Amino acid sequence: MMKWDRLDISALLLVGAATVAVAQTSGGQSWPADAKPFRSEDESLRNYQCPEWFRDAKLGIWAVWGPESVPRQGDWYARNLYLQGSSQNKFHVEHYGPPSKFGFKEVIPLWKAEKWDPNRLMGLYQQAGAKYFCMIAMHHDNFDCWNSKYQPKWNSLNLGPKRDIAGEWQQAARNHGLRFGMTEHLAASWWFYSANKGRDTNGSLAGVPYDGNDPRFADLYWSGNEHPSFHYYGADVPLAYKLNWYNRISDMIDRYHPDLLYSDSPLPYPDEVGRKLLAHYYNDNLQQHDGKLEAVYNCKEESQGRWVQDLERGVKDGIDPHPWQTDTCVGNWYYKTGCKYKSTTTVLQMLADIVSKNGNLLLNFPLRPDGTLDEQEEKILGDLSDWMKINGEAIFGTRPWNIYGEGPAKVVKAGSFNEGKLAYTASDLRFTQSKDKKTLYAIALGWPTSGRLVVKSLAIAVGKINELNLLGQAGQIDWRQTAEGLEVVLPPQKPNQSIFALKITGVDLQPATVAN
């Protein structure tokens, strides 16, 4: 069994007697450099405010990459290889052998990262418009992608690449001026590895236990998790497991001081260790930035002012007063051979919709096991780079307008896993504005075949437009403001992407009532 460096639980459960008031500055929250104002009670954590860098950033790129990428069979391979009859189990048996003979512990050393060039990749991400980068620190597979103090065997310095994946990603991000984020998925690992406590039910090896039953490998697969809760990130786990989570994530914070920390769950174990960990993260960040809070914590739970909510593959139905984030992927989470990717048009439509509603997009480009992107992924990044050079000002550093947009594509119910339910058309527009509110951007999510765009929200009754330009178009274009809306005559040649932006300045521009 794994040995934990025991954290005193009485210290974890300690609740401070006072909450330190927040001092506001134009750049965010500030305290004395040596202060530790955040404590584990909600009243203290609600003093958190999202930093300006995140609100300005809008686009982050994520690399979901680790030993589960080795088979090139997509997400959750370390669990599904043990589920007899699943597609990943069939692949595993065919290529590696039965799980009772060749389990995930044998897959891990096959991850070599032999062609990984983090600086080249970060250059591609930066050119595509990313302002922050996130790496997966550990997935549900319980393998740490750094020199982990509390996972000394199953980490990337000891096995596989034998490199400090986190440290090299961090340095590359700094080299290219990107904020650095780390994502942790450990809370689900207890449930995740319950699958390898079984055995085949038929075939020549029926009844032979999988390797997860062997106590010699409990430091990877855990023990006592044969019958976990229904919820894959459930809280009904042993205290030792919760302390292990705390120790490993706090070790990660202390080593790398990430600008962004993401938990693939609600805040894990909030009544015991989760809020203590969150307070530690915020306080550590303050000390790293001379008393100015620059930290972003994402989890899949409404923030109530304590963090930045994340929606997996989901979008909001309107403008949220709190900054938020969508995390999604161009294809599968881990690299999958033959996976169909989102088109560049789809990515841009999602980005415009999310930004118009006060959100950010964290977009995963899964790496192949050798550390490279495939040609399709590089093409999408190149397309994004070309679009951002022309239209980036309508995205980066902006804020929502009075309404997020107009058109028939509307989210019926906000939440995770709803991204594919919207079909954007040339009649859909999304609005952003400069922080000084002097410039309005209308982003059209498609190119009208008629060559004429009507923005109903900018009818003449709600303000006067002084100047209008089509980003990327030299010279003036014809437009007029009527009682029906702003009518724009588009040039005969559409841009390389069907998504385009109008830059508008005027007086007292307020949205008219839109009838779609």
Image: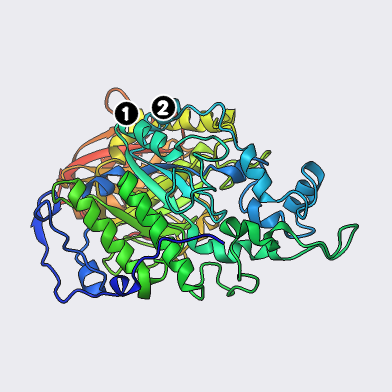
Residue positioned 32% across, 36% down in the render: 178
Image coordinates of residue 146 in percent, x first then y, are: 45, 43
Work out whether residue 381 can be spotted.
yes
Residue closer to the observer: 213 or 128: 213
Q: CA distance from mark 1 to mark 2?
A: 8 Å
Q: Are marks 1 and 2 in contact (CB under 8 Å)?
A: yes
Image coordinates of residue 153 in percent, x first then y, are: 53, 48
Which residue is under mark 2? Answer: 119
Number of the label disc, if any, that sits on residue 77: none
Image coordinates of residue 478 in percent, x first then y, are: 30, 32
Identity, as a three-letter code, of the amino acid under mark 2 = Asn
- Residue 368, by quadrant, is top right
Mark 2 Cα shell of 10 Å, populated few (<14), some (14-19), many (≥20): some
Work out whether residue 512 can be spotted.
no
Q: Up-down: is 55 above or below 175?
A: below
Callout 1 secondary element = helix
Task: Choose the circle earlier in sequence order: 1 or 2.
Answer: 2
Quarter in which the C terminus is drawn: bottom left
Residue positioned 59% across, 33% down in the render: 112
Residue closer to the observer: 100 or 486: 100
Image coordinates of residue 21 in percent, x first then y, are: 10, 67
Callout 2 secondary element = helix
Number of the label disc, if any, that sits on residue 175: 1
Quarter in which the N terminus is drawn: bottom right
Identity, as a three-letter code, of the amino acid under mark 1 = Asn
Residue closer to the observer: 369 or 378: 369
